[in-house]
Image (cartoon, grey):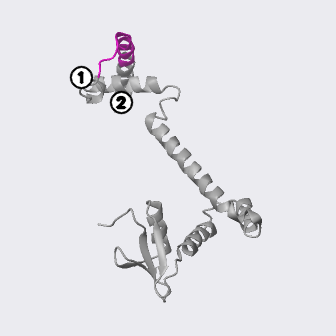
Amino acid sequence: MADTNKPLLIKRYASRRLYNTETSDYVTLDDIAEFIREGREVQIIDLKSGDDLTRQYLLQIIAEHESRGESVLPISVLTDLVRSYSTQATSMVPDFLAASFEMLQKSQSQMMENMAKANPLAGLPGMDAMRAQQEAFLKAMTGGMGAAGGQEGSAEAPPAADADDAEGLDDIKKQLADLQDKLSKLGK
């Protein structure tokens, strides 16, 4: 089993082929991009010279995505990056970019956490009524067995909700009767 705590070592041969040392097979840039998306750190080393080529290959992956129309970096950012190579700001740019991406990742993680905690559909108008109708329909279809769709151990609805459920159940029964009536007319 691979140790995912240390970087995945990829060796580049003189033929420019890339070799995954964990799985003992050749990989492509797309494979390397996928490893990174899965959270793996990757280190690409030239077999002959021992030079670390990781930066070059990561830039190549980004360039390929950008050329395919999968643009993430606006032209203004790319222009500013090019300018930063010829100014005194060169020493500040890496730290600034790293901090910016770290902040972006934290805010994305927080947003995903918040979305997971609260059902995003719950705030939409009519969702409570739709849920109550679904529960009443299931109750009517199952003859009251396993209320709320057969969820065992679910808490009973408060008395005020019983009146709403009865009203919703009557509506559903009426709709079912109307549908049955229409179907019987179609069959004639």
Residue under circle 1? 143
**Measured Cα–Cα span from mark 2 to mark 1:** 22 Å
Q: Is residue 103 above or below residue 50?
A: above
Residue 44 visible from this viewpoint: yes
Quick check: 60 left or right of 36?
right
Determine the residue positioned at 47% across, 30% down. Answer: 122
Determine the residue positioned at 28% across, 24% down. Answer: 154
Closer to viewer: mark 2 or mark 1: 1
Q: Position of residue 137 (x, y in %)?
A: 34, 25
Q: Quadrant of residue 138?
A: top left
Quick check: 1 left or right of 11?
left
Residue at disc 1, secondary structure = loop
Closest to the observer, 8 or 118? 8
Q: Is residue 110 above or below residue 78?
A: above
Q: Position of residue 93 (x, y in %)?
A: 68, 61
Residue stretch rendered in magenta on the structure: 155-169
Query: Crowdedness of circle 2 by 10 Å Cα count: few (<14), some, many (20+)?
Result: few
Q: Is residue 118 magenta?
A: no
Q: Which mark is drawn over residue 120?
A: none
Determine the residue positioned at 53% across, 73% down. Answer: 54
Residue 72 visible from this viewpoint: no
Q: Is residue 164 magenta?
A: yes
Q: Position of residue 82 (x, y in %)?
A: 73, 68
Query: Which three-letter amino acid code belongs to the residue tagged 1?
Result: Gly
Residue under circle 2? 183
